[in-house]
Amino acid sequence: MKGARHLTIDEKRDWLANIFRDESGEYSQGDKFKAMIEDTKLAIMLEEEKKKSAEKEEPQPGINHSLLAHLPPPC
């Protein structure tokens, strides 16, 4: 069976960070700017995925109000 064919978002962000931080002159300022833009897009995608997964989680059970009625009042 073949391995994973695509890079993860974290792997892509690492690759883009290497381009952006390049000091050897291999990449132009335009390449670095494009890398920064693409990294920002990937960061936004990660945040959206986190929000979606948080929405999919089951809500926490609420407080049973009949139990609260048996508690003494606060001091």
Image (spheres, grey):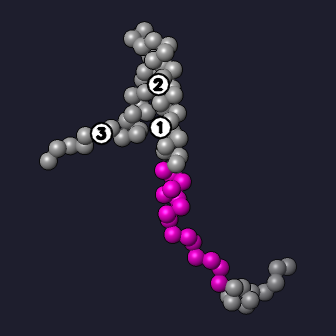
Residue 25's label in the rendered image is: none
- Residue 38 shows up from this direction: yes
Query: N-terminal of the two: label 2 or label 3?
Result: 3
Mark 2, residue position = 35
How packed mark 2 is, by other alpha carbons closer than 10 Å (few <14, some 14-19, many 20 or more), is many
Quarter of the figure with residue 68: bottom right
Mark 3, residue position = 6
Q: Position of residue 47 (x, y in %)?
A: 53, 46
Query: N-terminal of the two: label 3 or label 1?
Result: 3
| Nearer the observer, 53 or 74 | 53
| Nearer the observer, 66 or 53 | 53
How packed mark 1 is, by other alpha carbons closer than 10 Å (few <14, some 14-19, many 20 or more), is some
**Name of the residue lying farthest toward the top:** 25
Mark 1, residue position = 42
Residue bounds of the magenta highlight: 49-64
Name the amino acid, label 2.
Ala
Name the amino acid, label 1.
Leu
**For this view, does 7 lie left or right of residue 27?**
left
Q: Is residue 50 magenta?
A: yes
